[in-house]
Image (cartoon, rainbow, N blue to C red):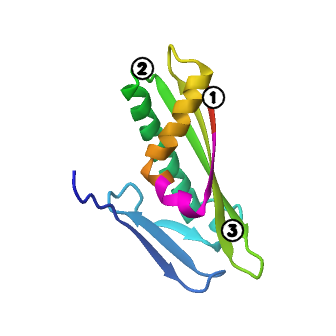
Amino acid sequence: MAGIKRRGTGVWKGTLREGEGSISLESAALRDEPYSFHTRFEDRPGTNPEELIAAAHAGCYSMAFANVLSKKGYQVDGLETQATIHLSQKKGGGFSITRSSLDVRGRVPDIDAETFKRLAEEADGACPVSNLLRPGLEIELEATLA
């Protein structure tokens, strides 16, 4: 597997506060999905870049953790990961993503809680999205057996 490329497109028209945009994915899973200042910095319905990063992080981490568990001989009945991206206002203006919190719950027979947590941490190192985010971002991990 060499040179896999994935694409997304963001379009924006207008000012930051009054403008609007749309996000599309090459796969068409999202096509012209609207976003705005209000969906990003307030609680209005719609998507935003941080939500998409959170979904990417959760999906990638779940796959990486399933792979780590399987390679160690465990059967994975189910993993559910919720990622929370923390966006904070910087002193002097602007915003910064400060951390990503991963909360994973798993159904894995014949594993104890300590081993589950240890392998959850190992999976964080095997997740390409975690590895992308980690240099400038704190990643918190909570792992619980269901």
- Outermost residue to the bottom: 15
- Outermost residue to the left: 1
- Marker count (numbered): 3
Q: Are marks 1 and 2 in contact (CB under 8 Å)?
A: no
Q: Residues within 10 Å of mark 2 (few under 14, many from 20)?
A: some
Q: Quadrant of residue 75?
A: top left
Q: Is residue 81 visible?
A: yes
Q: Residues within 10 Å of mark 3 (few under 14, many from 20)?
A: few
Depth check, front residue: 55 or 140? 140
Q: Which residue is mark 1?
A: 144
Q: Residue at x 52, y 67 (%)?
A: 34
| Circle 3: residue type | Phe
Dot label at residue 75: 2
Depth check, front residue: 39 or 73? 73
Q: Residue at x 69, y 78 (%)?
A: 94
Q: Secondary structure at mark 1?
A: strand
Q: Which residue is mark 3?
A: 41
* Position of residue 117 measured from the top left corner of the image (x, y, whole percent): 59, 30
Depth check, front residue: 40 or 34? 40
Please report whichever mark, 3 or 1, sits nearer to the chain's N-terminal start: 3
106 up-or-down from 132: above or below: above
Q: Quadrant of residue 114?
A: top right
